[in-house]
Amino acid sequence: MVPLYHKIRIPLRQVLDLTVLLDQALETLPVEPRLAGELEWDIQLISLDALRDDLVQSGLSKEAKLQLLTLALPRYLWRVRSLRADKPMFDVLLDATDLLQGKLVRRIVVHNPQLCREIATVFSLMKNIVDAGLEAVIAAFVEAMPAEGL
């Protein structure tokens, strides 16, 4: 048993279920390089201040940092980070304080633009056959990529 701040309403179980769905979907996507069995996942409950500190120290571009640092985000987030060979590919930021029926996925933080652009493109083309539980993730991927990139 782990004590949590009382405003944390999204249980770890839901975050794990979403991560498993995402992992299964990514393993079947026809993107290069192939992702089957390649991604590792790191799930953290993180405060907004800690997230902003991480973003400042990250290797993201100045424009990306500025955009992410000025976003209106909740005080606590679940960060689901995908890693490949210990390098971050993308982060899925989930609102840890929202209701279960709310908008859980808040943003995708893109660490590997080429891979994320391919994922966004394939997801947008396959959204009718991907699990309905991933609709918000698909929308976040598409939103995270510049329109001219798709």
Image (spheres, grey):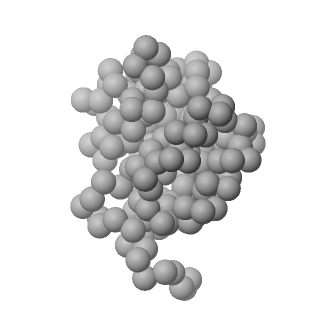
Q: 123 or 26: which is nearer to us?
A: 123
Q: Position of residue 101 (x, y in %)?
A: 24, 61
Image point (29%, 64%), residue name: 100
Image point (51%, 81%), residue name: 4
Say which quarter of the image contains residue 88: top right
Q: Is residue 99 above or below residue 37?
A: below
Q: Is residue 148 above or below residue 98?
A: above
Q: 76 or 116: which is nearer to us?
A: 76
Q: Is residue 53 left or right of residue 131?
A: right
Q: Position of residue 148 (x, y in %)?
A: 43, 14
Q: Position of residue 82 (x, y in %)?
A: 60, 43
**Residue 133 seen by the camera:** yes
**Residue 131 seen by the camera:** no
Image point (48%, 51%), residue name: 93
Quadrant (top left, top right, bottom left, bottom right) of the C terminus: top left
Say which quarter of the image contains residue 50: bottom right
